[in-house]
Image: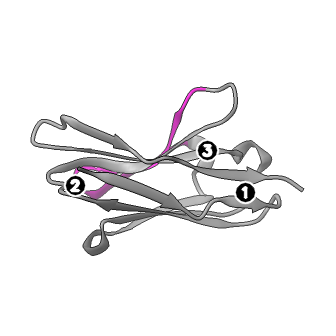
């Protein structure tokens, strides 16, 4: 059984920073992608940043230059460093991993709330 546990969310003022963490437990193999999505009220879930095969990173245009995804493979942990936060970054942030020889396994964390407000 694979579990993803996010932490690090909270309330921050505009221009502030937060770092999210996602710890994966269980048997993961042949990871196809691992990263972060977010969902704001009334909106669809969207990709924020992720690692894909070969270590390539992908960022949403709205967070480029402000957010940085990193990982500690030994700890099965992925981080999202968020800086220069804006009110429009307010959302529930979810960790996601897709793995398997045919990328047949797709798991989500429970989400962590990020609120950017003065």
Residue 83 lies in what quarter of the image? bottom right
Res 54 label: 2
**Which is in the foreground here, disc 1 or disc 2?**
1
Q: Residue at x 14, y 51 (%)?
A: 30
Question: Looking at the figure, which quarter contains the C terminus?
Answer: bottom right
Q: Earlier in the sequence, mark 2 or mark 3?
A: 2
| Residue 58 magenta-highlighted | yes
Side of 60 where 100 appears, left or right: left
Callout 2 secondary element: helix
Callout 1 secondary element: loop
Callout 3 secondary element: strand
| Residue 67 magenta-highlighted | no
| Residue occupied by mark 1 | 85
Q: Which residues are magenta?
A: 44-60
Residue 61 image point, x, y percent = 57, 42
**Which is in the foreground here, disc 2 or disc 3?**
3
54 or 3, nearer to the observer: 3
- Crowding at dot 2, Cα within 10 Å, few <14 / some 14-19 / many 20+, comes out as few
């Amino acid at each position: 059984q694979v579990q993803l546990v996010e932490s690090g969310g909270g309330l921050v003022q505009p221009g502030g920073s937060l770092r999210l963490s996602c710890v994966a437990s269980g048997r993961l193999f042949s990871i196809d992608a691992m990263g972060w999505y977010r969902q704001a009220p009334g909106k669809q879930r969207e990709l924020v940043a992720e690692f894909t095969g070969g270590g390539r990173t992908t960022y949403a245009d709205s967070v480029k230059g402000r957010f940085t995804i990193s990982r500690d493979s030994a700890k099965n942990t992925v981080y999202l460093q968020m800086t220069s936060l804006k009110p429009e970054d307010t959302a529930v942030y979810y960790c996601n991993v897709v793995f398997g020889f045919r990328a047949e396994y797709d798991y989500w964390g429970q989400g962590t709330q990020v609120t950017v407000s003065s």
